[in-house]
Amino acid sequence: MRLRFAAFFLLGLSVAALARAESPERVDLELALAIDVSGSVDNEEAALQREGYLKALVDPQVLRAISGGDRKKIALTYFEWASTHSQRLVVDWTVISDQASAEAFVKRLAAAPISTERWTSISGAIDFAMERFAASPYKGARRIIDISGDGRNNNGRPLEDARAEALAQGIVINGLPIVNDRPTRWGTPPERDLDIYYRDQVIGGPGSFFIVADGFESFASAIRIKLVREIAASRDPSLASNGTGRRRALCCPPAQQVALRP
Protein backbone atom coordinates (compact mmCIF):
# COMPACT_ATOMS: atom_id res chain seq x y z
CA MET A 1 0.00 0.00 0.00
CA ARG A 2 2.83 2.37 0.83
CA LEU A 3 4.50 1.68 -2.49
CA ARG A 4 1.21 2.14 -4.30
CA PHE A 5 0.59 5.45 -2.51
CA ALA A 6 4.10 6.64 -3.35
CA ALA A 7 3.60 5.70 -7.00
CA PHE A 8 0.31 7.61 -7.19
CA PHE A 9 1.92 10.58 -5.44
CA LEU A 10 4.80 10.71 -7.93
CA LEU A 11 2.36 10.32 -10.80
CA GLY A 12 0.37 13.26 -9.47
CA LEU A 13 3.49 15.41 -9.29
CA SER A 14 4.38 14.49 -12.88
CA VAL A 15 0.90 15.35 -14.12
CA ALA A 16 0.98 18.69 -12.27
CA ALA A 17 4.39 19.52 -13.72
CA LEU A 18 3.19 18.65 -17.22
CA ALA A 19 0.12 20.84 -16.76
CA ARG A 20 2.29 23.77 -15.70
CA ALA A 21 4.55 23.25 -18.71
CA GLU A 22 1.56 23.18 -21.06
CA SER A 23 -0.11 26.19 -19.40
CA PRO A 24 2.69 28.65 -18.54
CA GLU A 25 1.93 31.58 -16.29
CA ARG A 26 0.82 34.59 -18.32
CA VAL A 27 2.59 37.92 -17.96
CA ASP A 28 2.43 41.22 -19.79
CA LEU A 29 6.06 41.06 -20.89
CA GLU A 30 9.05 38.72 -20.96
CA LEU A 31 12.12 40.96 -20.77
CA ALA A 32 15.72 39.75 -21.06
CA LEU A 33 18.21 42.33 -19.79
CA ALA A 34 21.56 41.79 -21.54
CA ILE A 35 24.42 43.74 -19.93
CA ASP A 36 27.78 44.35 -21.62
CA VAL A 37 30.79 43.45 -19.44
CA SER A 38 33.28 43.17 -22.30
CA GLY A 39 36.85 44.43 -22.29
CA SER A 40 35.89 48.01 -23.11
CA VAL A 41 33.95 48.18 -19.82
CA ASP A 42 36.28 48.66 -16.84
CA ASN A 43 35.42 47.67 -13.26
CA GLU A 44 34.11 51.13 -12.36
CA GLU A 45 31.87 51.24 -15.43
CA ALA A 46 30.58 47.72 -14.79
CA ALA A 47 29.67 48.75 -11.24
CA LEU A 48 27.89 51.87 -12.52
CA GLN A 49 25.83 49.74 -14.92
CA ARG A 50 24.84 47.34 -12.15
CA GLU A 51 23.96 50.22 -9.83
CA GLY A 52 21.82 51.74 -12.58
CA TYR A 53 19.68 48.61 -12.78
CA LEU A 54 19.47 48.30 -9.01
CA LYS A 55 17.97 51.79 -8.85
CA ALA A 56 15.77 51.59 -11.95
CA LEU A 57 14.08 48.28 -11.14
CA VAL A 58 12.61 49.61 -7.90
CA ASP A 59 11.84 53.10 -9.22
CA PRO A 60 8.20 54.14 -8.59
CA GLN A 61 7.69 54.98 -12.28
CA VAL A 62 8.74 51.47 -13.31
CA LEU A 63 6.50 49.87 -10.68
CA ARG A 64 3.54 52.01 -11.80
CA ALA A 65 4.12 50.93 -15.39
CA ILE A 66 4.02 47.28 -14.30
CA SER A 67 0.86 47.73 -12.24
CA GLY A 68 -0.86 49.37 -15.21
CA GLY A 69 -0.66 46.26 -17.38
CA ASP A 70 -3.49 43.82 -18.03
CA ARG A 71 -1.92 41.15 -15.83
CA LYS A 72 0.00 43.62 -13.66
CA LYS A 73 3.20 41.58 -13.80
CA ILE A 74 6.22 41.01 -16.01
CA ALA A 75 8.87 38.27 -16.16
CA LEU A 76 12.48 39.41 -16.01
CA THR A 77 15.88 37.77 -16.45
CA TYR A 78 19.28 39.43 -16.18
CA PHE A 79 22.55 38.24 -17.72
CA GLU A 80 25.97 39.70 -18.45
CA TRP A 81 27.81 39.09 -21.69
CA ALA A 82 31.14 39.64 -23.42
CA SER A 83 32.60 37.26 -26.04
CA THR A 84 30.63 34.66 -27.96
CA HIS A 85 31.51 32.08 -25.27
CA SER A 86 30.99 34.40 -22.31
CA GLN A 87 27.43 34.86 -21.07
CA ARG A 88 26.67 34.64 -17.37
CA LEU A 89 23.12 34.25 -16.09
CA VAL A 90 22.93 36.47 -13.00
CA VAL A 91 19.22 36.23 -12.13
CA ASP A 92 16.96 33.72 -13.89
CA TRP A 93 13.34 34.33 -14.88
CA THR A 94 11.46 36.04 -12.05
CA VAL A 95 8.03 37.62 -11.91
CA ILE A 96 7.95 41.29 -10.89
CA SER A 97 4.49 42.46 -9.82
CA ASP A 98 4.99 44.90 -6.95
CA GLN A 99 7.60 46.63 -4.81
CA ALA A 100 8.30 43.54 -2.72
CA SER A 101 9.04 41.31 -5.72
CA ALA A 102 11.13 44.06 -7.34
CA GLU A 103 13.16 44.49 -4.15
CA ALA A 104 13.68 40.73 -3.93
CA PHE A 105 14.99 40.69 -7.51
CA VAL A 106 17.30 43.63 -6.79
CA LYS A 107 18.59 41.94 -3.64
CA ARG A 108 19.60 38.85 -5.61
CA LEU A 109 21.18 41.02 -8.31
CA ALA A 110 23.15 43.09 -5.78
CA ALA A 111 24.55 39.96 -4.15
CA ALA A 112 26.03 38.60 -7.40
CA PRO A 113 29.69 39.40 -8.13
CA ILE A 114 30.60 41.46 -11.19
CA SER A 115 33.17 40.16 -13.66
CA THR A 116 34.42 41.44 -17.00
CA GLU A 117 35.76 39.55 -20.01
CA ARG A 118 37.40 40.37 -23.34
CA TRP A 119 35.69 40.90 -26.70
CA THR A 120 32.20 42.07 -27.59
CA SER A 121 29.72 39.63 -29.09
CA ILE A 122 26.28 41.19 -29.42
CA SER A 123 25.34 38.23 -31.59
CA GLY A 124 26.29 35.89 -28.75
CA ALA A 125 24.14 37.92 -26.36
CA ILE A 126 21.15 37.65 -28.71
CA ASP A 127 21.66 33.89 -29.09
CA PHE A 128 21.85 33.44 -25.32
CA ALA A 129 18.72 35.53 -24.80
CA MET A 130 16.86 33.35 -27.30
CA GLU A 131 17.91 30.28 -25.30
CA ARG A 132 16.55 31.90 -22.15
CA PHE A 133 13.22 32.63 -23.86
CA ALA A 134 13.01 28.98 -24.91
CA ALA A 135 13.52 27.97 -21.27
CA SER A 136 11.14 30.56 -19.82
CA PRO A 137 8.29 29.16 -17.69
CA TYR A 138 6.22 32.25 -18.52
CA LYS A 139 4.23 33.44 -21.52
CA GLY A 140 4.36 37.14 -22.28
CA ALA A 141 2.27 39.22 -24.63
CA ARG A 142 5.62 40.53 -25.89
CA ARG A 143 9.22 39.30 -25.72
CA ILE A 144 12.03 41.85 -25.67
CA ILE A 145 15.81 41.65 -25.54
CA ASP A 146 17.19 44.80 -23.94
CA ILE A 147 20.86 45.16 -24.94
CA SER A 148 23.09 47.74 -23.27
CA GLY A 149 26.70 48.20 -24.32
CA ASP A 150 29.50 50.54 -25.32
CA GLY A 151 30.94 48.80 -28.35
CA ARG A 152 30.34 47.11 -31.69
CA ASN A 153 30.10 43.39 -32.36
CA ASN A 154 33.68 42.15 -32.85
CA ASN A 155 33.46 38.48 -31.93
CA GLY A 156 31.32 35.48 -32.80
CA ARG A 157 28.97 34.99 -35.71
CA PRO A 158 27.64 37.89 -37.81
CA LEU A 159 25.31 40.13 -35.85
CA GLU A 160 22.85 40.38 -38.74
CA ASP A 161 22.31 36.59 -38.66
CA ALA A 162 21.53 36.44 -34.93
CA ARG A 163 19.36 39.52 -35.16
CA ALA A 164 17.39 38.14 -38.12
CA GLU A 165 16.70 34.87 -36.29
CA ALA A 166 15.41 36.68 -33.22
CA LEU A 167 13.14 38.93 -35.28
CA ALA A 168 11.81 35.92 -37.18
CA GLN A 169 10.63 34.51 -33.84
CA GLY A 170 8.76 37.71 -33.03
CA ILE A 171 11.31 38.88 -30.48
CA VAL A 172 11.87 42.65 -30.31
CA ILE A 173 15.39 43.98 -29.74
CA ASN A 174 15.84 47.34 -28.02
CA GLY A 175 19.14 49.03 -27.28
CA LEU A 176 20.84 51.24 -24.77
CA PRO A 177 24.16 52.36 -26.29
CA ILE A 178 26.50 53.97 -23.77
CA VAL A 179 28.21 56.90 -25.45
CA ASN A 180 31.16 58.43 -23.60
CA ASP A 181 34.59 59.92 -24.22
CA ARG A 182 36.50 57.71 -21.81
CA PRO A 183 39.27 55.58 -23.35
CA THR A 184 39.15 51.83 -22.80
CA ARG A 185 41.25 50.12 -20.14
CA TRP A 186 43.93 49.61 -22.81
CA GLY A 187 44.01 53.30 -23.73
CA THR A 188 42.23 52.92 -27.07
CA PRO A 189 39.66 55.61 -27.98
CA PRO A 190 35.94 55.02 -27.35
CA GLU A 191 33.60 53.93 -30.11
CA ARG A 192 32.38 56.68 -32.43
CA ASP A 193 28.76 56.92 -33.64
CA LEU A 194 27.71 54.01 -31.46
CA ASP A 195 24.15 55.32 -31.39
CA ILE A 196 24.01 55.13 -35.20
CA TYR A 197 25.38 51.59 -35.07
CA TYR A 198 22.69 50.51 -32.60
CA ARG A 199 20.04 52.18 -34.71
CA ASP A 200 21.09 50.52 -37.95
CA GLN A 201 22.55 47.18 -36.83
CA VAL A 202 21.19 46.17 -33.41
CA ILE A 203 17.58 47.13 -32.70
CA GLY A 204 14.68 45.64 -34.60
CA GLY A 205 11.09 44.47 -34.50
CA PRO A 206 7.74 46.26 -34.15
CA GLY A 207 8.05 49.30 -31.93
CA SER A 208 11.76 48.79 -31.28
CA PHE A 209 13.83 51.76 -30.14
CA PHE A 210 17.02 52.77 -28.40
CA ILE A 211 17.86 55.33 -25.77
CA VAL A 212 21.35 56.80 -25.50
CA ALA A 213 23.07 56.91 -22.13
CA ASP A 214 25.47 59.84 -22.23
CA GLY A 215 28.12 58.08 -20.19
CA PHE A 216 27.86 55.51 -17.44
CA GLU A 217 26.90 58.15 -14.89
CA SER A 218 23.54 58.73 -16.61
CA PHE A 219 22.85 55.03 -17.04
CA ALA A 220 20.28 54.78 -14.21
CA SER A 221 18.18 57.58 -15.69
CA ALA A 222 18.38 56.08 -19.18
CA ILE A 223 17.39 52.58 -18.12
CA ARG A 224 14.50 53.89 -16.01
CA ILE A 225 13.05 55.73 -19.01
CA LYS A 226 13.65 52.71 -21.20
CA LEU A 227 12.00 50.23 -18.82
CA VAL A 228 8.91 52.41 -18.45
CA ARG A 229 8.61 52.70 -22.21
CA GLU A 230 9.06 48.97 -22.80
CA ILE A 231 6.60 47.94 -20.11
CA ALA A 232 3.97 50.48 -21.11
CA ALA A 233 4.28 49.45 -24.77
CA SER A 234 3.19 45.93 -23.81
CA ARG A 235 -0.35 47.21 -23.35
CA ASP A 236 -0.19 50.14 -25.81
CA PRO A 237 2.14 49.52 -28.78
CA SER A 238 1.70 53.12 -29.93
CA LEU A 239 3.88 54.18 -27.01
CA ALA A 240 6.76 52.32 -28.61
CA SER A 241 6.26 53.67 -32.11
CA ASN A 242 4.96 57.22 -31.85
CA GLY A 243 7.09 58.88 -29.21
CA THR A 244 8.96 62.09 -29.75
CA GLY A 245 12.72 62.14 -29.78
CA ARG A 246 15.75 63.76 -31.28
CA ARG A 247 16.12 61.26 -34.09
CA ARG A 248 13.94 58.71 -35.85
CA ALA A 249 15.70 55.57 -36.93
CA LEU A 250 15.66 54.86 -40.64
CA CYS A 251 16.01 51.08 -40.64
CA CYS A 252 13.89 48.04 -40.35
CA PRO A 253 10.35 48.95 -41.45
CA PRO A 254 7.54 48.61 -40.50
CA ALA A 255 8.80 49.41 -37.00
CA GLN A 256 9.14 53.11 -36.27
CA GLN A 257 12.17 53.15 -34.02
CA VAL A 258 12.71 56.25 -31.94
CA ALA A 259 15.92 57.38 -30.33
CA LEU A 260 15.39 59.21 -27.08
CA ARG A 261 17.93 60.85 -24.84
CA PRO A 262 17.08 61.00 -21.14
Image (cartoon, rainbow, N blue to C red):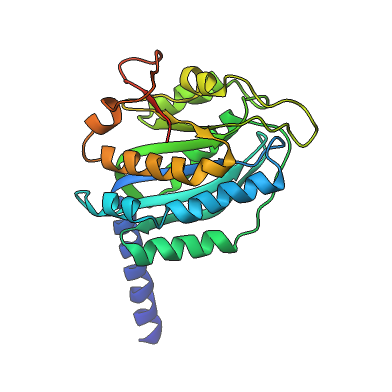
* Residue reaching furthest to the left: 70
Residue 195 % position (x, y) = 52, 23
Residue 23, visible in the rendered structure: no
Residue 99 % position (x, y) = 34, 63
Residue 256, visible in the rendered structure: yes
Q: Quadrant of residue 236?
A: top left
Residue 15 % position (x, y) = 31, 63
Quadrant that contains the C terminus: top left
Relative side of 145 to 1, left or right: right
Q: Quadrant of residue 178?
A: top right
Residue at 41% over, 14% down? 251
Residue 124 % position (x, y) = 59, 33
Residue at 67% over, 35% down? 83
Asked whether 91 or 136 is in front, the reply is 91
Relative side of 145 to 177, left or right: left
Asked whether 7 or 149 is in front, the reply is 149
* Residue reaching furthest to the right: 186
Quadrant that contains the N terminus: bottom left
Asked whether 81 or 246 is in front, the reply is 246
Tell me: residue 194, above or below residue 47: above
Relative side of 58 to 16, left or right: right
Residue at 56% over, 43% down? 217
Residue at 26% over, 25% down? 242
